Amino acid sequence: MTDHPANGLDDVVHQRVRLGIMAIAHQARQVEFGFLRTTLQLTAGNLGQHLTVLEKAELIQIEKGYEGKRPRTWVTLTPAGQTALREEIAHLKRLIQEVEQAETAETTGDR
């Protein structure tokens, strides 16, 4: 029996909010803190905690600056973050495939 795909899921990446942060940052290349907070429906403090976890794991880079006179925080995936996201998605795809195969076997009686 091969290793189950759920065993490959990364606890840092897989957590719902952190996976959302990484997916959005991947799509946008660089994303602003306020956009993440609104999109993921989080408080600033909660989002900040998740960003700290990802930053300590070196999966994101945080850049602080100003847009006009307003302070801004931007989030970018690091190369390690890009890799971690790709690997997480690959494990999720394998997990989904196994579940779908089991459902197909159930309905066709091939179990």
Image (spheres, rainbow, N blue to C red):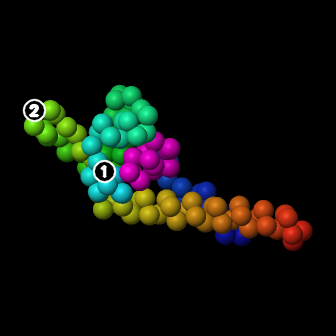
Tell me the residue at 71%/61% (across/down). 99
Looking at the image, residue 70 sits to the left or right of residue 52; the answer is left
Considering the image in quadrants, where does the N terminus appear? Answer: bottom right
Q: Judging from the image, what secondary structure is the residue with disc 2 in?
A: loop
Q: CA distance from mark 2 to mark 1?
A: 25 Å
Q: Judging from the image, what secondary structure is the residue with disc 1 in?
A: strand
Looking at the image, residue 25 sits to the left or right of residue 99; the answer is left
The residue wearing badge 2 is 69
Q: Position of residue 48 (x, y in %)?
A: 33, 34
Quick check: is 36 in the magenta stretch? no
Q: Position of residue 8 (x, y in %)?
A: 55, 59
Tell me the residue at 36%/61% (across/down). 82
Q: Position of residue 31 (x, y in %)?
A: 29, 48
Q: Amino acid at mark 2?
A: Lys
**For the magenta stretch, what is the residue range?**
13-24
Quadrant position of residue 97 = bottom right
Q: Earlier in the sequence, mark 2 or mark 1?
A: 1
Q: Between 4 and 27, which is closer to the camera in this rendering?
A: 27
Tell me the residue at 47%/63% (across/down). 87
Residue at the extreme right of the image, as rendered: 109
Crowding near pointer 2: few (<14 within 10 Å), some, many (20+)?
few
Looking at the image, residue 7 sits to the left or right of residue 26; the answer is right
Image vertical order of residue 19 relative to residue 48, above or below: below
The residue wearing badge 1 is 60
Considering the image in quadrants, where does the C terminus appear? Answer: bottom right
Evaluate whether residue 111 shows in this view: no
